[in-house]
């Protein structure tokens, strides 16, 4: 979310890096502007930025190192740059986890958006008895931590015979993404104009067609925000796959999600294993998130903070 | 044209509501029921034991220790995160030296916001791999590497961050703060931008310094957001499952060394999936749920202030 420019100052003047004339005018800045506090606060902002970027850059760099270098000192520089380690990580399981996650997300995000927008639309735009109750019923689910429901959920999914299956996890992801999706889209559908919808109805359009062909296209910005939120949220989900996607028998296929698989690799390998491959795997897991975040950072920040701003 | 309204409403709501009720609401409710039994999880046999699980829970020393750790997180996590986020948000929105337009953020504010928020979109698995490497207990770890480079640490006796009973909880706290500050920074920024600039300009004309402006103008006007942040952070402090279970030593779901990193959620999961005490784990879940609800209510009540309209 970039700072909206609110003042009408022409651009060249804003960009001019010459604070000297301003300094003589005491009314245009804080009484204690500049000086020690300024250096301190700028320094602190820069320090925090370094604290965020440094560990991430360091670990991406570490994936190019050898095992010996990683165990030795934190300050060695990779001797040869080769993408071979990423191929190794991909073949060591990360590739499979990555594809599992993509398959699950392709269905779960689509279904979340479909069911979420359908429910939110009906609750936002149609009057019927029990409307408010249903709305609160949905929103309440967002307030409790997931692990409180884990024990019964595990047995529920087991009784449905869906442990360690894509379809089981997809359904669970959809169900647990609904509260926020409904909450967000409910307020969004409320703000949309009613005139277009009414015109469509007068022209003899059915309720269903009005929703899919008139309302959904208008709601695109809201759908995009909450869709990105769901992609990131489900991509990063850890505790649900950890509980529901464990191999049920020796012959069962490994359907691990990327996050879960990565942690398993970390815990299994410990210090003796192939650390560069682990770091390379982490980099592979981070890249899609980084790309989505940087391309849509306005929507990401708006979507993530919307839940808290009533 | 409204005569086919109800079939449409039912048709749109039936799938989302059924899915949500079955996979989210019903497990939450079942948690309450199971907490009154001696169910082991594996068998279908269970006996009603009344409140025995709850009485056992309060004499369970490990649970009490875990509760203490959650309480410590509960005190420090909100205070540290909110203070840092407020400071950064203030610097990025109004802390700049102010051009002719009056009040603005420091230079590069937009870039800082993008960087500071980034940890929020990283998954727990990435954080786990990253901080496992940062907290490594030899010279290959980033923290120990820095300390040794600066000559503050004897390379022969490096600090074992996550294996040190006195440090492990603070290491977890540091990660929670590291990844959380950006989110609350964006939350507070959005609130700060809705404060009219005239208010700041008035303060500035009266000769207020930045510190004064912050405490007399910004903080009172932001109180609602601070309150929301407090509740969210309190809920996060009661959780901390993912980081503790992946980063701290221990047989199942971490919690070590010797329960010094234990939190309630990890102890719950160990009882459920490792010790096979599902009924007991459910009782723990119910206690955590009520503690969280009480805390949120108390936090809202205690921090309530007169709302300032602007």
Image (cartoon, coloured by chain):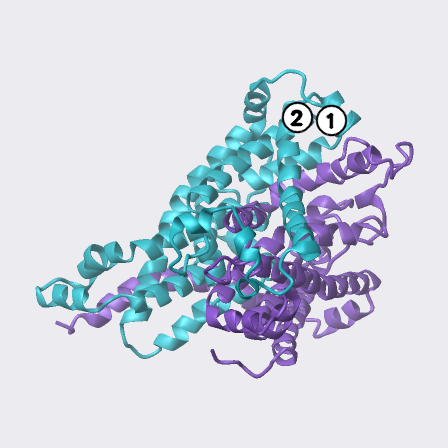
Chain colours: A cyan, B purple
Please tell me which residue lies in front, A259 or A255.
A259
Element class at badge 1: helix
> As drawn, is B22 to the left or to the right of B185?
left
CA–CA distance in space, label 1 to label 2: 8 Å
Q: Quadrant of residue A55?
A: top right
Q: Residue at x 34, y 64 (%)?
A: A188
Q: Residues within 10 Å of mark 2 (few under 14, many from 20)?
A: many
Q: Please report, as a chain letter, where disc 1 is located.
A: A
Q: Residue at x 81, y 37 (%)?
A: B137
Residue A45: percent from left, percent from top = 63, 50
Q: Quadrant of residue A76?
A: top right
Residue A24: percent from left, percent from top = 57, 58
Q: Residue at x 54, y 32 (%)?
A: A284
Residue picked out by circle 2: A276
Residue B296: percent from left, percent from top = 62, 73
Q: In which quadrant is the N terminus of chain B drawn?
A: bottom left
Residue B249: percent from left, percent from top = 78, 44
Q: Residues within 10 Å of mark 1 (few under 14, many from 20)?
A: many
Please tell me which residue lies in front, B100 or A5.
B100
Q: Residue furthest bottom?
A: B306
Please tell me which residue lies in front, B124 or A56.
A56
Q: Is residue B153 above or below residue B184?
A: above
Q: Please report, as a chain letter, where disc 2 is located.
A: A
Q: Residue furthest left?
A: A203
Q: Is residue A259 above or below residue A61?
A: below
Residue B102 in view here:
yes
> As drawn, is A109 to the left or to the right of A211?
right
Residue B272 in view here:
no
Marks 1 and 2 in Cβ contact (< 8 Å): yes
Element class at badge 2: helix
* Pointer 1 or 2: first along the chain: 1
Residue picked out by circle 1: A70
């Amino acid at each position: 979310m970039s700072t909206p420019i609110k003042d009408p100052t022409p651009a060249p003047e804003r960009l001019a890096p010459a604070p000297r004339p301003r300094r003589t005018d005491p009314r245009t800045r804080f009484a204690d502007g500049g000086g020690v506090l300024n250096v301190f606060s700028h320094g602190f902002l820069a320090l925090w930025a370094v604290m965020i970027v440094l560990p991430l850059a360091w670990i991406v760099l570490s994936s190019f190192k050898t095992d010996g270098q990683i165990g030795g000192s934190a300050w060695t520089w990779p001797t040869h740059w080769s993408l071979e380690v990423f191929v190794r990580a991909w073949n060591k399981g990360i590739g499979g986890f990555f594809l599992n996650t993509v398959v699950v997300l392709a269905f779960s995000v689509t279904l979340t958006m479909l069911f979420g927008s359908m429910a939110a639309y009906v609750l936002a735009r149609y009057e019927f008895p029990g409307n408010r109750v249903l709305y609160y019923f949905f929103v309440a689910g967002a307030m409790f931590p997931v692990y409180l429901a884990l024990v019964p959920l595990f047995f529920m999914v087991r009784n449905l015979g869906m442990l360690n299956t894509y379809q089981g996890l997809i359904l669970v992801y959809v169900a647990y993404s609904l509260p926020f999706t409904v909450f967000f889209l409910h307020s969004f559908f409320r703000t949309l104009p009613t005139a277009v919808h009414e015109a469509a109805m007068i022209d003899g359009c059915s309720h269903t067609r009005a929703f899919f062909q008139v309302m959904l296209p208008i709601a695109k910005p809201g759908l995009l925000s909450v869709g990105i939120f769901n992609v990131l949220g489900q991509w990063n989900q850890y505790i649900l796959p950890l509980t529901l996607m464990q191999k049920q028998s020796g012959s069962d296929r490994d359907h691990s999600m990327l996050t879960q698989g990565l942690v398993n690799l970390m815990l299994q390998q410990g210090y003796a294993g192939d650390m560069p491959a682990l770091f390379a795997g982490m980099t592979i897991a981070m890249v899609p998130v980084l790309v989505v975040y940087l391309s849509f950072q306005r929507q990401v920040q708006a979507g993530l903070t919307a839940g808290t701003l009533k | 044209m409204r005569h086919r309204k109800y079939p449409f409403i039912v048709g749109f709501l039936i799938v989302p509501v059924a899915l949500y009720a079955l996979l989210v609401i019903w497990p939450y409710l079942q948690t309450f029921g199971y907490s009154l039994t001696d169910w082991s999880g594996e068998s279908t046999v269970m006996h009603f034991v009344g409140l025995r699980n709850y009485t056992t829970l309060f004499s369970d020393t490990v649970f009490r220790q875990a509760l203490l750790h959650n309480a410590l997180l509960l005190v420090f996590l909100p205070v540290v995160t909110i203070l840092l986020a407020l400071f950064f948000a203030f610097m990025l929105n109004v802390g700049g030296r102010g051009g002719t337009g009056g009040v603005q953020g420091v230079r590069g504010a937009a870039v800082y916001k993008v960087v500071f928020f980034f940890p929020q979109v990283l998954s727990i698995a990435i954080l786990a791999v990253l901080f496992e490497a940062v907290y490594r207990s030899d010279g290959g770890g980033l923290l120990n590497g820095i300390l040794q480079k600066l000559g503050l640490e004897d390379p022969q006796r490096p600090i074992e961050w996550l294996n040190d009973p006195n440090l492990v909880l603070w290491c977890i706290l540091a990660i929670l703060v590291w990844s959380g500050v950006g989110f609350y920074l964006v939350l507070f920024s959005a609130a700060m931008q809705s404060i009219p600039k005239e208010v700041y300009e008035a303060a500035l004309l009266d000769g207020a310094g930045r510190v004064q402006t912050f405490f007399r103008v910004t903080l009172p006007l932001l109180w609602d957001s601070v309150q929301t942040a407090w509740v969210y952070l309190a809920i996060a402090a009661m959780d901390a499952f993912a980081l503790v279970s992946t980063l701290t030593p221990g047989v199942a779901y971490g919690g070590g060394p010797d329960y010094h990193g234990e939190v309630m959620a990890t102890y719950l999961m160990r009882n459920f999936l490792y010790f096979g005490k599902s009924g007991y784990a459910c009782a723990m879940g119910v206690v955590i749920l009520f503690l969280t609800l009480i805390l949120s209510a108390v936090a809202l009540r205690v921090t309530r202030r007169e709302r300032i309209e602007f």
